[in-house]
Image (tube, helix red, strand yellow):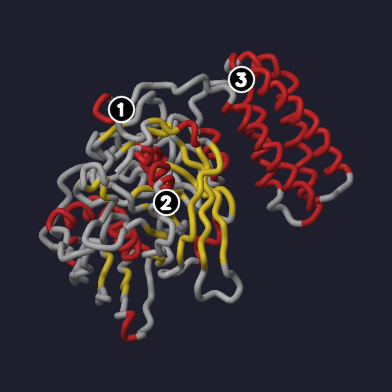
């Protein structure tokens, strides 16, 4: 394990002196560093210029020495590693920013960022029904109300419940009119359950039973999310022709990932429930579901777990991705980014390359356990089978204002047991990943093809 020695995040290029850690990729290739220097300069120098000099020292882990981590240096290491094989980090003092930096926080943040994976998935649905959103929002706000200590939180919760109930009563007709015709009966049934559930939650609040609030809130939001999914009538757009023959997830699916933990006496195994969003990333999510059905990940170890991300998907042998038996070549997929306000994802280019500096992604890196594809840093369409889950660090990857959005393809979120991701270590084994719902949304499944 190479080390980064005496690295500085500073206010001028001339003062920056990064020593190349020479972290190898799988095999013998090492990514070029000249482009890396310019890219990192663009992302971080303006941020560093407003801060005092931060001295960051990382010692060689093999020597067992301690290290301290400061925001700027770690941000570099974090983002540098979110690719297929970690690149070296030569930082040239002669490199300079050749294009605009990321937008300011004031541009990106239009309100408190949404960090709950369930809420992110609900808002990412391709629907436009204000009435159901007005029911959803106060129910989600209960989470903030519960941050108040003791039973005083229940006064705020009661206001949330009353607002949600009032919105449901006033907007029910509009909500029903927004349901897809083929799903209307199911949607109406869910709305009836939602009404009953709200009455039950109101009684819970009146009984001052704080502990029962969160479970009931989760149940009601599940109803809301299911109603919203019943508003989606078919798949909302055509995937570009060049990708139409690939495995595509036209809708959503859910998988359970069972991991065997080797060296944790308090946690022998855990199951992570992951929702995959094919509405906003049909190619990326379809590729993953197809690999799951091939049992590609079963028995594979966790290959990176450094406090920033958990990563896996690099098969044994020289290949860094999935080798399609029918072609005997690595199957790769394009970078796929859906932007708020667009009807079709962008393919093959980062939002920075497209000049969309102010654009918001439909599936942002906001939640602990955000799932995305790893890829080569300078090859946008090189993702294959390596995936990672982001472990949030608010100072390093703030929601709504981080360097990952629009650069890596998010295609799902861990919605249950996501906190346990932080306990995983390199060498822990993925015993199995199984599709538990939504498999019928997968089209062009290559795993069914012989060979």
At horizontal 44% and vertical 52% (from top left) the residue drawn is 398
Alpha carbon separation for disc pair 1 and 2:
23 Å
Residue sitting nearer the eye, 110 or 252: 252
At horizontal 48% and vertical 21% (from top left) the residue drawn is 234
Query: In the rendered image, which residue does mark 2 sit on?
Result: 295
At horizontal 35% and vertical 85% (from top left) the residue drawn is 65
Alpha carbon separation for disc pair 3 and 2:
32 Å
In primary-sequence order, the first of circles 1 and 2 is 1
Q: Please tell me how crowded label 3 is: few (under 14), some (14-19), or many (20+) other residues with Cα within 10 Å.
A: some
Horizontal side of residue 348 vs 144, given as left or right: left
Residue sitting nearer the eye, 259 or 53: 259
Q: Kindly state the secondary structure of the residue where label 1 is placed.
A: loop
Q: Kindly state the secondary structure of the residue where label 3 is placed.
A: helix
Alpha carbon separation for disc pair 1 and 3:
26 Å
**Looking at the picture, does residue 232 appear above or below residue 297?**
above
Where does the C terminus fall, quadrant-wise?
top left
In primary-sequence order, the first of circles 3 and 2 is 3
Task: Identify the residue at the far front of this view.
Answer: 450
Query: In the rendered image, which residue does mark 1 sit on?
Result: 244
> Which of labels 1 and 2 is toward the front?
2
């Amino acid at each position: 394990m190479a080390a980064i020695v005496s690295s500085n995040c500073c206010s001028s290029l001339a003062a920056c002196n990064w020593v190349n850690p020479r972290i190898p990729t799988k095999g013998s290739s090492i990514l070029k560093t000249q482009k890396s220097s310019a890219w990192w300069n663009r992302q971080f120098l303006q941020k560093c210029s407003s801060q005092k000099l931060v001295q960051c020292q990382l010692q060689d882990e093999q020597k067992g020495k301690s290290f301290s981590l400061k925001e700027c240096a770690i941000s570099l290491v974090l983002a540098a590693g979110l690719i297929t094989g970690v690149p070296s980090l030569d930082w040239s003092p002669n490199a300079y920013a050749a294009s605009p930096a990321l937008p300011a926080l004031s541009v990106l943040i239009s309100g408190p960022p949404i960090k709950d994976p369930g809420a992110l998935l609900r808002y990412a649905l391709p629907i436009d029904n204000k009435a159901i959103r007005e029911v959803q929002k106060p129910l989600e706000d209960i989470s903030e109300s519960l941050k108040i200590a003791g039973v005083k939180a229940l006064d705020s919760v009661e206001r949330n419940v009353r607002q949600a109930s009032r919105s449901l009563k006033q907007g029910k007709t509009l909500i029903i009119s927004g349901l897809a015709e083929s799903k209307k009966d199911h949607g109406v049934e869910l709305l009836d359950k939602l009404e009953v559930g709200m009455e039950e939650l109101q009684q819970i609040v009146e009984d001052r039973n704080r502990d029962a609030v969160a479970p009931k809130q989760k149940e009601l939001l599940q109803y809301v999310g299911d109603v919203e999914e019943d508003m989606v009538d078919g798949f909302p757009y055509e995937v570009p022709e060049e990708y139409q023959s690939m495995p595509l997830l036209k809708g959503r699916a859910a998988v359970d990932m069972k991991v065997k933990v080797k060296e944790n006496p308090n946690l022998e195994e855990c199951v992570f429930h992951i929702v995959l969003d094919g509405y906003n990333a049909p190619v990326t999510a379809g590729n993953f579901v197809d690999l799951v059905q091939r049992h590609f990940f079963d028995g594979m170890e966790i290959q990176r777990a450094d406090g920033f991300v958990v990563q896996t998907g690099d098969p044994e042998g020289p290949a860094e991705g999935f080798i399609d038996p029918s072609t005997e070549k690595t199957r790769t997929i394009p970078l796929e980014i859906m932007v708020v306000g667009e009807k079709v994802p962008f393919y093959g280019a980062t939002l920075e390359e497209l000049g969309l500096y102010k654009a918001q992604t439909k599936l942002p890196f906001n939640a602990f356990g955000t799932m995305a594809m790893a890829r080569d840093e300078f090859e946008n369409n090189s993702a294959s089978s390596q995936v990672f889950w982001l472990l949030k660090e608010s100072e390093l990857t703030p929601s709504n204002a981080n360097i990952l959005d629009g650069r890596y393809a998010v295609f799902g979120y861990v919605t249950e047991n996501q906190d346990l991701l932080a306990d995983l270590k390199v060498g822990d084994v993925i015993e199995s990943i199984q599709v538990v719902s939504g498999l019928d949304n997968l089209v062009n499944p290559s795993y069914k093809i012989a060979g």
